[in-house]
Image (tube, helix red, strand yellow):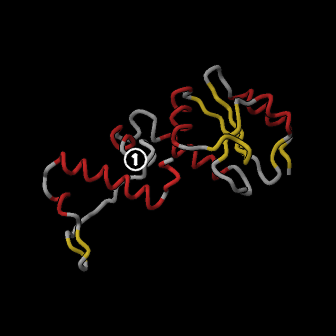
Amino acid sequence: MVLMCEPVVRAIEAVKDDDALVYLLTPQGITFNNDVAEQIVKKTKHLILICGHYEGFDERILNFVDGEISIGDYVLTGGELPALVILDTISRFIPGVIKEDSYLNDSFKDGLLDYPMYTKPRDFRGLKVPDILLSGDHAKIDEYRHNEKLRVTKEKRPDLLK
């Protein structure tokens, strides 16, 4: 199924205002990531995402949108799941949705993965929470967490360090 030009353009025109951004969700779009999410939040308060299904769109629709976004190098049966991924990611950057320090310390914010997290008990079957995290020395804890972010990124996603 290829989405027809006229009904899609009429739908865009019915809801688009001067502040809106309109994106098609396609495999050939820019790759969506945290930086793209933050830029979208900075540019607009009105986002329109157009989801294709199976074969995509009439090519002429590109004349009525601001761009194309992809959530990765694979093909899904429709754009509904990518739209949800984009909305969930973007919502975290809208002031008041979550505490700012929550997303400022997330994975990818500084180009690194997040540091390991621990809960109680302190010792679970011989697997212990690192002593430094229980020390109360916030400077040393911050240093430990930064070093752990580097270690985890190097081990699991070395491509991020390039």
Residue displayed at 55% across by 44% down: 33
| Left or right, residue 60 beside residue 131 | right
| Left or right, residue 40 beside residue 96 | right
Between 131 and 51, the one lying in front of the other is 131
Which residue is label 1 attached to?
106
Outermost residue to the front: 162
| Left or right, residue 29 beside residue 138 | right
| Left or right, residue 112 beside residue 23 | left
SS at circle 1: loop
Outermost residue to the left: 136
Q: 148 above or below 14? A: below
What x and y, as percent, mark residue 68? 70, 38
Residue displayed at 37% across by 57% down: 151
Label tally? 1
Residue displayed at 56% across by 26% down: 43
Residue 8's quadrant in the figure? top right
Three-letter amino acid code at disc 1? Asp
What x and y, as percent, mark residue 81? 63, 53
Mark 1, Cα crowd under 10 Å, few <14 / some 14-19 / many 20+, is some
Between 111 and 77, the one lying in front of the other is 111
Q: 108 above or below 120? A: above
Q: 123 above or below 21? A: below
What x and y, as percent, mark residue 86? 58, 44
Residue displayed at 67% across by 46% down: 70
